[in-house]
Structure formats: C-alpha cells, structure tokens
C-alpha cells in the first residue's frame, strides 16, 4: 500500500537482470529476478551455439552449465645442462 493506493493484483512485469556467459563456442543468456529480501530466481534463459549459429536450448528451467575451459598443456621444465 502506498498512501491511499492499494495494488490489487501482482504486476505482469518482473524487473531483474541478465547474465551473459560465453566460452567462445556457446553463449548463455539468463534472466534473473530478486524480490526484496527474497532469493534470486531464474526466470528464463537461452543458449546459443556460436559455431553453428543456432539456439540449442531455451526455457524457464535452469540453463545448462557451460563446459569448463580446457587447461593449457603443462610445460616441461628445461633440461639441465651437463658441464
């Protein structure tokens, strides 16, 4: 209630924010809301295959996690020279 005005029904608009993550092959875009004092809720998402140029997943369920980046190969220590 604000002053003498009362909201009778919930608004159809949810304010939130987008998160965008990429691994250079895929891009995940997620819309999240956080009501005052409440938990963050994922409302919608889309996953794009950047190589193929296609949507691979979308909806209101949690987005699939992007693959973990591969670690670069370990470098071998230099060989010691014999004197």
Image (cartoon, helix red, strand yellow):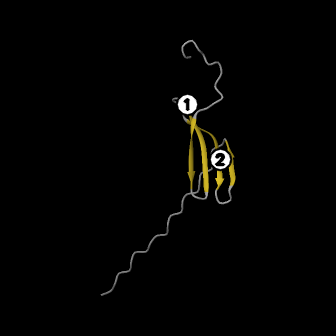
In the rendered image of this protein, does residue 19 appear above or below residue 83? above
How crowded is the residue under tag 1: few (<14 C-alpha within 10 Å), some, or many (20+)?
few
Q: Residue at x 63, y 30 (%)?
A: 13
Vertical order, 23 against 8 (above or below): below
> Which residue carries the number 2 mark?
46
Q: Nearer the viewer, mark 2 or mark 1?
A: 2
Q: Residue furthest bottom?
A: 83
Left or right: 81 as drawn, with respect to 32: left
**Residue depicted at 68% across the width and 56% down the height:** 53
Q: State how far apart marks 2 and 1 are (Cα).
A: 22 Å
> Compared with residue 46, is residue 12 higher up or lower down, i.e. above or below?
above
In the rendered structure, the answer to whether residue 65 lies left or right of residue 83 reads right
Asked which quadrant contains residue 24, the reply is: bottom right
Residue 26: image location, x then y, percent: 61, 55
Q: Residue at x 68, y 59 (%)?
A: 52
Helix or strand or loop: what does disc 1 sit on?
loop
Q: Which residue is mark 1?
A: 35
Give the camera-side residue of 43 and 29. 29
User: Which residue reaches farthest left?
Assistant: 83
The residue sitting at 34% across, 84% down in the picture is 81
Q: Nearer the viewer, residue 34 or 17?
A: 17
Q: Position of residue 4 (x, y in %)?
A: 57, 12
Q: Residues within 10 Å of mark 2 (few under 14, many from 20)?
A: some
Judging depth in this view, the residue of 4 and 80 nearest the camera is 4
């Amino acid at each position: 209630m604000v002053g003498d005005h009362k909201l009778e029904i919930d608004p159809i608009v949810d304010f939130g924010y987008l998160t965008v993550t990429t691994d250079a092959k895929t891009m995940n875009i997620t819309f999240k809301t956080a009501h005052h004092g409440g938990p963050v809720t994922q409302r919608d998402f889309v996953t794009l295959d950047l190589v193929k140029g296609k949507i691979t997943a979308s909806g209101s369920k949690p987005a699939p996690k992007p693959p973990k980046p591969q670690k670069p190969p370990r470098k071998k220590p230099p060989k010691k020279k014999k004197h």
